[in-house]
Image (cartoon, rainbow, N blue to C red):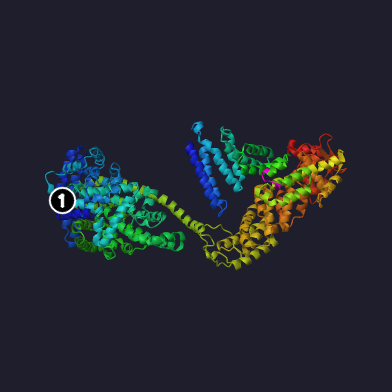
Amino acid sequence: MFAVTLDLRIFANNAEQQLQKKSKGQPGEMLEKAAEQLMSCFRVCASDNRAGIEDSKKWGMMFLSNQLFKIYFKINKLHLCKPLIRAIDSSNLKNDYSPAQKVTYKYYVGRKAMFDSDFKPAEEFLSYAFHHCHRSSQKNKRMILIYLLPVKMLLGHMPTHQLLRKYDLMQFADVTKAVSEGNLLLLNEALSKHETFFIRCGIFLILEKLKIITYRNLFKKVYLLLRTHQLPLDAFLAALRMMQLEDVDIDEVQCILANLIYMGHIKGYISHQHQKLVVSKQNPFPPLSTVS
Amino acid sequence: MAANTTQAATTTSWSYGAAADGQVHENPEWEKARQALASINKSQSSAKAAQANRTTGEASQFQPAATDSAAIQQQQQQQQQQYYPWYQQTQQHYPGYTYPYNYYYSMGPPPPVPGMEDQSPSYPSQPQPPPPATPQPPQSPTTSDNPPPPPPPPIPPPPNSQYPPPPSQNAYSANNSMPYPPGDPNQMQVYSHSQGRPNYGQGFQAQNTYQPSQNTSQQQQQPGQYVPGLGRGEANKNKNQKQGQQLWHRMKQAPGAASVKFNIPKRPYQVQCSPISNQTYPPGEQPSGTPSSPASASAAPGGAQTRPQDWPQAMKEYVQRCFTACETEEDKDRTEKVLKEVLQDRLKDGSAYTIDWTREPLPELKVKQSRWEAVPPQRTSDGSISRGGSTAAAASRGRGGGHRLGHYRNIFSQRSPSSSSSRSSSRSPSPSHGRHRDRSNQRHRRSDSGSQSDSSISSDLRPQLSRRSQRGARGRGNDRDRGRGGGERGRGRGGKANRGRRNMEDSNSAGGKKRKGGNAGLDFHDPNREAKKQSRAARFHKQLRSEPLILSINALDLPDGTQEGLSWEDCPIVGTCQDITKSYLRLTCAPDPSTVRPVHVLRKSLLAVKAHWKNHQDYLYACEQMKSIRQDLTVQGVRTEFTVEVYECHARIALEKGDHEEFNQCQTQLKALYKDNPSENIGEFTAYRLLYYIFTKNSGDLTTELVYLTPALRADVCVAHALALRAAWALGNYRRFFKLYQEAPRMASYLIDKFVERERKVALRAMVKTFRPDLPVQYVQSNLGFSCLDSCMAFLTGLGVTFYLSDPQKIDCKTSTAALAAS
């Protein structure tokens, strides 16, 4: 059975490689065909209930699903990953696959979760992948970090400068700095500067959400400066104007604040009548990591 | 093969001499043989008696034939006589015949028959047990008819019982000697000659028979083809049967004298086999064809499959159906004509078919040859006739052959579609004409065949000739019957022959003695025949059903092939239709230029549709017209700025009316069209695409779309707006989102309308949760882009928002939060 599984893997690999080469001419088509074949293999493996656990074809599931993930991510059909993940999750061998396979699997599952805006599980999977990835495979770790960093930042964990430098991810440096400082201006610059890179990695939209965190940090600064729990909206408007957002009006400030409050980044409420933000006297800006 | 033929020739020479004179001898011999068989197998005794009766019947028939004064008639009679004996023997002897067959079969491999070598490839493949079974069933239809029901059952057991003793040669000789009168070796030989030759002719000598009519070279080719065909013959029953037949022939030939009984069985076999052989013959398509329609092969193996070789299977099957459907000769002729026309038309029209057709002409020759070969095995005499028919020189013969044998006609007809002159000639003569012609032709045939046979292979040809003459006689007397039977083809032949015999017997019933017995035998046969006929009919029906399906598939395939294999651009069509408006019909076949509008007409059409749309706002009409315009453009492979314009126009109209499907179709087309035909509206529709991704929340596609956005495109007003809207949407900045919504350029607002409600709900939820203690409706209205207070109120009340009783213009946020959270 192992031999069969191995053959399946090799076959899948070859098929995928060949088809990926061809896919240059016909993007997607051949990849989809390869995915079909892999999927059929996967079904065979998943439906192997009779063989003993030690030589069950199910051991090939994760490998195949990983290959399928690669294809699906390439052809932008993430919704097809769901049944694979479910099948693996329901497998009792989930934790017994080889570390390499598990790292790959977690990497893709984490990426998928990230794209689905499930940042908590995404962070969990990607962290697992990052920590269990072989220490010599820097390239893989870097790939993991590309997706792990935005998620971490969204959840309030800013990467250190050393980390970014170690993995040659200095594109994140300015972003990190801007977010932590609440410097919207710098953030916008950083994003536009490395936009192509971020877009190619598919994380531009994720990083864009960092703006919310940046607002939060910025407003927190305003709060700290004013040292009162009744904050006039004009103050926030001034802060935003300082960030060269010239077209911002008071309504938009209310909107941003409303979103922050709605998402839990700020504890408080807006008094429309008085044009004031009333924040909680205790911990008005809860730590990001505690905010869902 | 050569060795076989020579042997056959020798045997034939023997038989020939015997044949003329031998018939008389045959009867006593037969009786003896039968008796011997009877002694061997008690169970078969009844059958033997029947056989004896038949033999008597034959004799009686013979006599009446002799009575005929006319020389032609005499010849015919002779033919008939010969024929009859053959038939009777074959049919009657079946019980015994089966024995030898089996023996031979087992024997087959061991006896180093000269012919064996040639066929050796097929040999190994033949499973010994299966061959007997396979040949028997086919025999049963024709042959079983003749013998009374009781005998057939006994027959099968004996073979099996004998079968076990494989000592092939020993058993063989023993069997031969045993069944036949041990005392008369000469008689035995005669028997074998007369009968054995037919077998030969059927199996191996078919080629020989061919030779007289056709060139030797063709004959040689034929054999070669034949063998390959057999070899190719896959595991199909047909193959087995063929092989079995071949084995038979070989075996018979090798033993020579012993093969007498074999010869008898051969006919039925041949009939059955011939179809099979025909099927297998077609070198190219047989393998595929046979597997696809095993039933058809078994049911109507002969005629239908012979032609199809070159044609696609569907075509073959189609032709088969046509022929099977018509029982009378006339019908066949008609169908032939029709088929020709249809096929030719298809050739002209169908591009996909053209390939096949182009191939056909070459294979046709082979096919003909192979058919010929195949034909002879069916009926030894037929084979001779067919030869004459096949050769253009022997056109007259061919006519006669065609008339005489419905099978031949079928064959011809089948070929005819391919455009063989011979078949046309054969077909053209009407059955009635055929009779007269047959007589005259028969004479010619005889002479021709005899000359040919002498020239090519003297001995072999003779028996064939005699057979031919016999057939001819039958054909004359029973042309109609044959023709009817022709519809049934392979198996039907046997039945026809039987009928012919009956008729002959009836007409000839001069001698009452034997005749009674013969009648009895015939009577017995009749019920069987009918049953067989029914079974055949059932088979045909099955085939018919299956075939139509295939046809439809084929018909569908053609357009598909054109569409898929040849893109629209590859086969440009220039429309000629001048109608400005045209209703949309989904194309199910190749487009007709007369219904397709050229571009300059389409331009007018587009303007007309636009004007109509502005004036009437009739979306159904506009959509239909636009679709028809798009279709005409697609059909003509027009991918220009005008095409872009059409799609843009349709996309806008569809967008305005919220027609998702059409809009997306246009968008996908536009995306491809823009690569070749950059339009000033690229930005607009790119923006629409971005907005649509927002609507579907497809962040993946959104990201990929962002990758392809060039700076120039980003600068486009629409794209910039869409991007800004996207950013606002991503951050939940409803304030900015709705501001942008109200500033939407061009028709973007139509697209945003699709998800504006969704965003409003989200925004309102946030607002209600955030603002305390109250929220003025005015503020909501301005922030959420409501054009007026009333619509905002309607929206709010629709969501179950509660207002302060004191001031209905203020939302009670605290209580509304719960309501909104629930919604």
> For this rendering, which residue is in front, B549 or B327?
B549
Q: Main secondary structure of the magenta part?
A: loop
- Mark 1 crowd level (few <14, some 14–19, many ≥20, 10 Å Cα): many
> For this rendering, which residue is in front, B531 or A212?
A212
Give the secondary structure at mark 1.
helix
Residue wearing tag 1: B190
Q: Position of residue B491 (x, y in %)?
A: 30, 50
Q: Position of residue B411 (x, y in %)?
A: 33, 57
Does B404 lie within the magenta span? Answer: no
> For this rendering, which residue is in front, B767 or B372?
B767
Quadrant of residue B44 within the rendered picture: top left
Q: Quadrant of the N terminus of chain B?
A: bottom left
Q: Label 1 sits on what residue type?
A: Val
* Residue drawn 82% across the image and 52% down it: A246
Q: In the drawing, does residue B799 fall left or right of residue B83?
A: right
Quadrant of residue B651 within the rendered picture: bottom right
Magenta residues span A166-171
